[in-house]
Image (cartoon, rainbow, N blue to C red):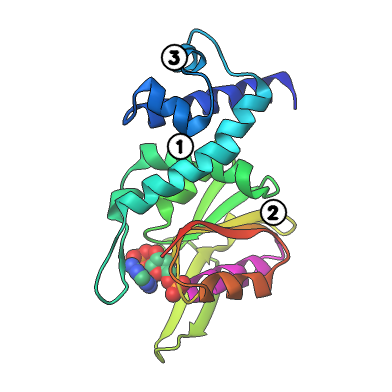
Amino acid sequence: MNRAEKAALQLRAVDVLRMLKETRTYDELAETTGLPAGDLNRYVNGHVLPGTERAREVVEDIGREALAAELDARIRVDDEGYVDNSGTVFDQSFLDLVAPVVANAFEFDRPDVVLTAATDGITLAASLASYYGTRCAYAKKSKETAVEEFIEARQRLQSGIELTYYLPAAAIDAGESVLVVDDLIRSGETQELLLDIVETSEAEVAGVFALIAAGEDGIRRARSRTDAPVGSLTSV
Ligand SMILES: O=P(O)(O)OC[C@H]1O[C@H](OP(=O)(O)OP(=O)(O)O)[C@H](O)[C@@H]1O
Ligand SMILES: Nc1ncnc2[nH]cnc12
């Protein structure tokens, strides 16, 4: 890790601690993190930065657990098992905190492009692309005007309806590494279409990530398509 990466990790750890501190006293934060309350006070107030190892622990372990709990608190599941995740996907600041935690916890190779499906995956993809300093691309259910060439992925869904996603062909180059993300994965059909797009582009899959897995089917399906890491922050 070079000096800039070390500093970035330390600052990310402070962001996570500040988020946790919003709803906790220092004693409670000490209990959540296992770190001394006096140290936490100095980190949160910006007087001292946590050391690299401590920062890593905060971001990868404590951060992942805390953000998963925060995500659970923000989603609502209706009587039929459908998820209302607008409390999450409309909150770019929350997603900006999620991105580094996810990137560090899941060990994805650093992608060239973060790819999602319009609409609800876009804000998460934007946060992850911003974290990695890479491009963000989203496939849409309709063709964007004035674009000449598209990559198309079509599938007949379990419901019998045919679904087609279109991505401007220039969005991904052959040989690039693509992280496929979405807010939610249930059947895995949407992720599969995105993986088809990556394949058609002759690009590589860096990983598959969803904030929420509704059941196991989608994650299993994505795993059957790639050896890259596949995961979600929480499941319902
Ligand atoms: O794993 P699956 O069964 O494919 O379901 C997951 C997909 O469903 C939702 O999108 P939706 O099609 O509702 O479009 P939206 O993002 O525009 O709401 C969600 O944002 C995922 O993209
Ligand atoms: N909001 C949602 N909850 C559960 N499954 C879904 N499949 C597509 N959208 C969904």
Rendered location of residue 6, percent (x, y): 67, 23
- Of the residues shown, which amino acid type is indicated by label 1? Leu
**Residue 21 image label:** none
Which secondary structure lies at badge 2?
strand
The disc, 1 or 2, on the residue closer to the chain's N-terminal end is: 1
Rendered location of residue 169, percent (x, y): 58, 62
Start-end of magenta stretch: 189-204
Disc 1 residue crowd, few under 14, some 14–19, many 20+, Cα 10 Å:
many
Tag 1 near tag 3, CB within 8 Å: no
Q: Mark 1 = which residue?
A: 97
Ligand 2, seen in the image, is in the quarter at: bottom left
Q: Mark 2 = which residue?
A: 177
Q: Mark 3 = which residue?
A: 41
- Of the residues shown, which amino acid type is indicated by label 3? Asn
Relative placement, left or right, of 38 versus 105 is left
Asked where in the image residue 176 lies, by quadrant, the reply is bottom right
Q: Nearer the viewer, mark 1 or mark 3?
A: 3
Looking at this view, is 164 or 180 the one in front?
A: 180
Tag 1 near tag 2, CB within 8 Å: no
C-alpha gap between disc 1 and disc 3: 20 Å
Residue at x-position 47% and y-position 59%: 182
